[in-house]
Image (cartoon, rainbow, N blue to C red):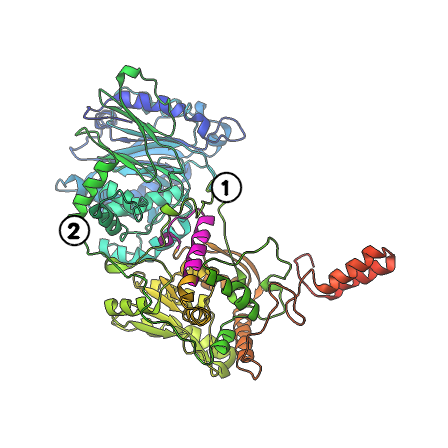
Amino acid sequence: MTRLGGAPSYEIIQISLAALERLTHRGGVDADGASGDGAGLLTSLPQKFFRERAKELNIGLSELFGVGFAFLPASATVEFRAAIEIAADSEQLRVIGWRRVPVNVNALGRKALETMPEIWQFFVEPLQNPQAGDEFEKRLWLLRKRAESLLPERCYLCSLSSQTVLYKGLLTPWQFPQFYEDLRDPSFAVTFAVFHQRYSTNTQPSWHLAQPFRYVAHNGEINTIVSNRRWLRAKEREIQEKLKVGPWFSILEDNVSDSASFDNGFELRLLDGLSSEEALLAMMPPAYEKDPLLSRDVRNALSALSQHTEPWDGPAAMVFSDGQWVGAKLDRNGLRPLRYTLTHDGLLILGSETGLVDLEESRIAERQRLGPGEMVLANPASGQFFRWRDVLKRMAAKQAQNAVPQRQVAEIFHSRPTLASEAKRVAGAAGWTEDQFKILFSALLRGKEADWSMGDDAPPAFLSALPRTLWDYCKQRFAQVTNPPIDPLRETHVMSLEVHLKDGITLPSPLMTPAQLSELREIFGFGHRIDFTFPAAAGVPGARCSFAQLSTTPLSGSDPPRLLLLSDRAISAERAPLPALLATAAVWKAMVRNGLWDVPLIVESAQVFDTHHVALLVAAGASAVVPYLADEFAESLEAGGAEKARAAILAGLRKVLARMGVSTAASYRNSHLFDVVGLSQDVCDQFFEDASDYPGQKSLDDLLGDYLKLHKAAFSDEGDELADAGLYRFRKGAELHATSPEVVRRLHAFVKAPTAKQYSVFEELAETQGTIFLRD
């Protein structure tokens, strides 16, 4: 809510509170019927109001001052003030006074009253020489970050700024103005207000998680929040060095919602020098990759912005402000509503509903809704209002001044891969089986994944008596609650499999050809090649030793690599492979520890022949995957087979993303968006710390032992052909099946002669055939 070119006005508050009350139906309410999930207002700083309040407290405010707004438990008041004073002194700032925010507790519901914190404001000014506004704002930000590292538990700084102030709480919209007496004061004059009524889905309602946050109000879900948080943590050390701050600095707040983490990320982009619209376009890019209506300059500018951060993907209507500009943006799919109305006298109202404000039709100059990925931007002081095309032109002009050349490494098959003489033995050692080759892999040569019926009567990997590969202990996840999956066929135009590497280099997908790998090596240099095979004769201890070397040897030198290639091409009768997924996870964690998060990690593996495998490697941190043995087999079966198989896997990869409501592979990378079932807690904690896990008894030694068994069988006298493991159909001496021929035969016998004896014969089989399901 703002008036373009208008002076600060209390009317903005009045209209915003009325509009907020009309959002009551969108918010959640506690079982007590009176405590809301949260409501709030983010406004420009009403300087006249705070000068008057400070004067009443005998506090003299200088020309440049900031206001902090805090929640804290009554028992922590002294510690809180001390932490703020220490942090202010460290940043060459001075706390000049405190103000208890006047509230009406009679307006609260029972739950809100029981959890209500003390609510304080404090005033901050530069310690010595007057500072420029932007520099002072940055100092206030560092003060808040430093204070957060010192504050006792349950203390929360809602806002600390010289440009904005935030009022919020565990309130319903109608309680909000009754509770905060400041908002009923006519001198509370502002140029804009961002209002929000919360419906809590992924976190419990609380005072500090009410919205808006310091910069944004968000309606929706961030489906890639695990990935986004992992990326921010990966970059934290580099950001600390860039900002010249100590280990006390933390990008992310703990125990907050996806919206609060988005606010943290947005704040970081602003400090990185991006404008508010550039920050939002980098974090929530539109589907520019396939949009024929966008000019080359705009497309290049959006591609350049995407280098700053991976997309924060999911259904989202985002309203934002940096204190000077205020705007709104939709996600690339347009899965949440946003509409705006502009009057002839410059009043701009934007929200998820129509009818937020009653207006005569004669007053309305423009009424529009935002489309997928679109943004509007307004400057209340200057009166500027930019619609979507204007925003794109403005952004492209800015990016052109600091343009980084963009280069795409196209998918080309310079030469057809040929099948090695011991390819099937290598495949067996890498975990392939005959039934997977015939049913799962060969179907890819038709350009699509194999068709399956619902249900599986074979035991899951952790219950199987046969050696199973690590892939089988991991399951793809699907979106739930209010973040629905998307359709990868109907919405393919908004999906992108592009992989953005450093220096403006882009891959069309995470699936690479050997020719692309050669081109990358020309661009980045040969890089480090890491062999993740080990001497089979060394057994499990040798495999463990190789794991330890994976994460140290190639990264310990003084000259950091510009490209890392993980490869198991050395598989032979003497050398067995480590699980590709574990090797990738281990090396990626080591790269992050060493500050090499921006170095491309390419996995070249014989173990990869399915969409599931590619998706898991990307989710574990791989930039791209080279399935060299799958390419060789595909080409040996049919000329051009490798290209068809790749097309099928990429179509399958879109389905994997779509099941989680994710549109871009860049968001999926490093996401740990999969479930781990049956591995020991130690393995989950060591390699998949952010994945959902259902721990079992399968230890790392057990896994490595299984891979050694596969290797031994593959290079035995009978290993010249792949073994049929009976994973998808019954085979004698192979994997168990609940509907085996013997089960069916005995069931038929009982149906034909339903006697107690025949039933006992059938029942006996259930006791002796082995464990297939958990209930067994």
Provide the residue span drawn in magenta: 645-668
Check disc 1 and give the amino acid type. Val
Q: Secondary structure at mark 1?
A: loop
Dominant secondary structure of the residues highlighted in magenta in the image? helix
* 111 left or right, relative to 748: left
CA–CA distance between discs 1 and 2?
42 Å
Question: Residue at image x 27%, y 69%?
Answer: 521
Q: Is residue 144 visible?
A: no
Q: Amino acid at mark 2?
A: Asn
At x 45%, y 55%, the residue is 652
Can you tell which mark lies on residue 758? none
Q: Which residue is mark 2?
A: 402
Residue shown at 33% from the left, 52% from the top? 310
Quadrant of the image occupied by residue 382: top left
Q: Secondary structure under badge 2?
A: loop
Q: Nearer the viewer, residue 416 or 560?
A: 416
Vertical arrangement, residue 466 with respect to residue 91, above or below: below
Q: Is residue 375 above or below residue 273?
A: above
Marks 1,2: beta carbons within 8 A: no
656 falls in the magenta region: yes
Q: Quick one: which residue is furthest to the left in this view?
A: 129
Tag 1 residue: 481
Which residue is nearer to you in this view: 216 or 757? 757
Q: Does the stretch in magenta take in 101?
A: no
Q: Which image quadrant for residue 643?
A: bottom left
